[in-house]
């Protein structure tokens, strides 16, 4: 489920070419603070996915809600 969630979120990513050929900027709408800035598009995608993973882990650790993406919802349950 987690991998499907990450893939769904990454499919919503938006990328821009920076001025003066300075590389690429990427972000995922609805995931505040998840962004990347790298020289190549592929490196930007990889960094964005890494940032997303860290963001998800932080939100889970803090018991904060995660956005629903393409009908996929991750929730934290209390351990028995």
Image: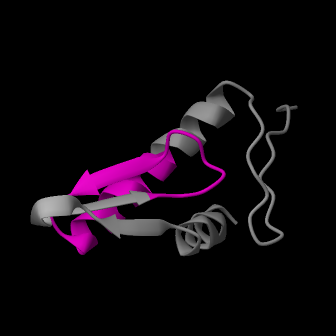
Residue 29, located in which quarter of the rendered image?
bottom right
Horizontal and vertical percent for residue 22?
A: 13, 59
Rendered position, 38 above or below 76 = below
If the image is split into quadrants, where does the N terminus sit?
bottom right
Task: Say if residue 22 shows up in the picture.
Answer: no
If the image is split into quadrants, where does the C terminus sit?
top right
Task: Say if residue 21 shows up in the picture.
Answer: yes
Q: Which residues make up the magenta segment? A: 27-53
Check residue 46 for magenta coloring: yes
Looking at the image, which residue sits at the far top? 62
Residue 26, located in which quarter of the rendered image?
bottom left
Q: Tally the marks.
A: 0
Horizontal and vertical percent for residue 45?
A: 35, 67
Residue 3 or residue 72, whichever sits in front: 72
Rendered position, 67 above or below 65 = below
Residue 6 or residue 13, whichever sits in front: 13
Q: Is residue 33 left or right of residue 25?
A: right
Q: How is the image coloured?
A: one colour
Horizontal and vertical percent for residue 73?
A: 81, 58
Check residue 56 for magenta coloring: no
Residue 79 or residue 70, whichever sits in front: 70
Q: Residue at x 34, y 52 (%)?
A: 36
Looking at the image, which residue sits at the far front? 19
Horizontal and vertical percent for residue 71?
A: 84, 70
Rendered position, 69 above or below 32 = below
Q: Residue at x 58, y 64 (%)?
A: 6
Q: Residue at x 12, y 66 (%)?
A: 21
């Amino acid at each position: 489920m987690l991998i499907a969630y990450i893939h769904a979120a990454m499919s919503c990513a938006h990328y821009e070419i920076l001025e003066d050929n300075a590389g690429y900027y990427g972000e995922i709408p609805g995931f505040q603070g998840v962004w990347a800035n790298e020289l190549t598009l592929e490196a930007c995608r990889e960094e964005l996915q890494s940032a997303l993973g860290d963001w998800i882990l932080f939100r889970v650790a803090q018991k904060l809600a995660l956005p629903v993406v393409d009908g996929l919802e991750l929730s934290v349950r209390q351990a028995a």
